[in-house]
Image: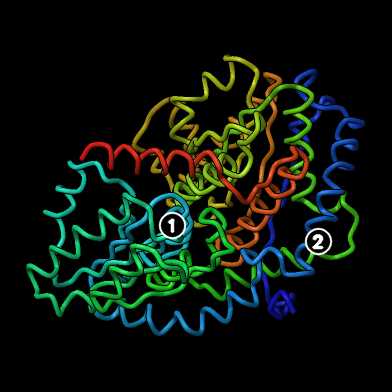
Amino acid sequence: MWLHSVDHALVNSVFVQDIEGCMARTIGSNGISGQEFQEELSCCGQALTNFRLACKHRKIPALDTEQSMRLLEDLAPIAEKISEQFRTVLVLGVGGASLGGSALVDSLGKRANNNTGPELHFVDSIDPESVEKLLTSISLDTTFFLVISKSGKTLSTLAQFLIFCDLVAGSLGREAVSDHFIAVTEASENPLRRSAGRMGIRVLDHDPDIGGRFSIFSVAGLVPALIAGVDCRGLLDGVAFALNTILSEAPVDTIEAARGAAVIAGLAKRRKIITNVLMPYSDRLRSFGFWYRQLVAESLGKGGEGILPVNAMGTVDQHSQLQLFLDGPPDKMVTFIGISSSERSRPIPSHLLEGVERLLFVRTSIGHLFEAEYMATIKSLTSAGRPTRKFSLGSLGAEDLGGLLTHFMVEVILLGGRFGVNPFDQPAVEAGKKMARELLLDSH
């Protein structure tokens, strides 16, 4: 069994993808025709067949929810102990080592839902000023450090690890280091694993077959999420629910990830629209946007192919980037994510205003205004002939997020097949890491 068993009747993981705003019949010449969409869907159908075969033979461990559920059994008591003993948790890592966990924590963590729990900080920068500022804001005796590097060789993460280890040893004693740190890295001979072993620090194994940007459902994403109180079982139920449909024998035109990949590929290949803006209308999805950006950029940007992912946030970027999206070069597709919010939001006290503005706000809540801004932005782009698609969710629970994450991961994998690139490697990034090591050695 590759997917863990889930009662579909108990899973409320439903979103609706609407791609009509990318079609020529709706927006004109910037969109793709029905025939072009069907042709692209046929190409993505072959990629879907390959994906289903790979999953059948357990070749994509990043989406093996049975394995992820087993991991939860081991990780839950570790996370619970950290949550009970520490007030602050610093996650040291960069790229996929932090972006997945950050997306889960910011979307579903206790603090995101106004509950208590340790405060998590994802420390992904080695800007000297930021490091010093962070040092003045934490108390080492109540701070735990989760160090994540798949390879165990990432220079920035190693530097962070060594600095904080030295500080904890100097302030609390060398024997305290093992109580304040856990390292996550693959089971190979690498600098992080060796250093952690010398200091008595526990090491959790990172699956060597799961790349950082796909590691959100593995130890790298689940440990921070568990510490933050995320319902990880619900999250994985949402993943399994989504995958059950994708991996069924359902025709390609009923698989939303394939439909999304087809429209993106069609716009890229046939209209030269290779910039994809992700614009969620939910502050809880801000970090989700950064996770998506890495997923798209590192998975598809190879051999002259690729999609340029751009982050935007509603309603904030209506007042910064929207002018460009509406009236700049017609080379962008905008993907919106909207979550129903009007029923649980604060009413606007219209009696404090006079005139037309007062009428605008009569019996209106901040949620109604938010949704009106959302719909108006989509309508303005559609009217200007700019491609848009939208995802509509009734809520943003663990199961909903699991389904949404799965959609985008599979969509990108299918696009890799359409573009003829391997979505799971990153050769150019590895070359850059090698150059950094050589520059450091040459400076001595």
Q: Secondary structure at mark 1?
A: helix
Identified by mark 2, the residue type is Arg
Q: Which residue is mark 2?
A: 52
For the point 58% across and 73% down, the residue is 234
For the point 30% across and 56% down, the residue is 158
Query: Picture coordinates of residue 164 (x, y %)?
Result: 19, 61
Q: Secondary structure at mark 2?
A: helix
Residue 398 position (above or below residue 379):
below
Is 391 in front, or is 39?
39
Identified by mark 1, the residue type is Ala
Query: Picture coordinates of residue 182 (x, y %)?
Result: 32, 72
For label 1, count other residues whose C-alpha is less than 10 Å away and answer few (under 14), some (14-19) or many (20+). Answer: many
For the point 28% across and 80% down, the residue is 84
Query: Picture coordinates of residue 146 (x, y %)?
Result: 33, 67
| N-terminal label among 2 and 1 | 2
Q: Which label number is shown at residue 65?
A: none
Q: Which label number is shown at residue 97?
A: 1
Residue 333 position (above or below residue 294):
above
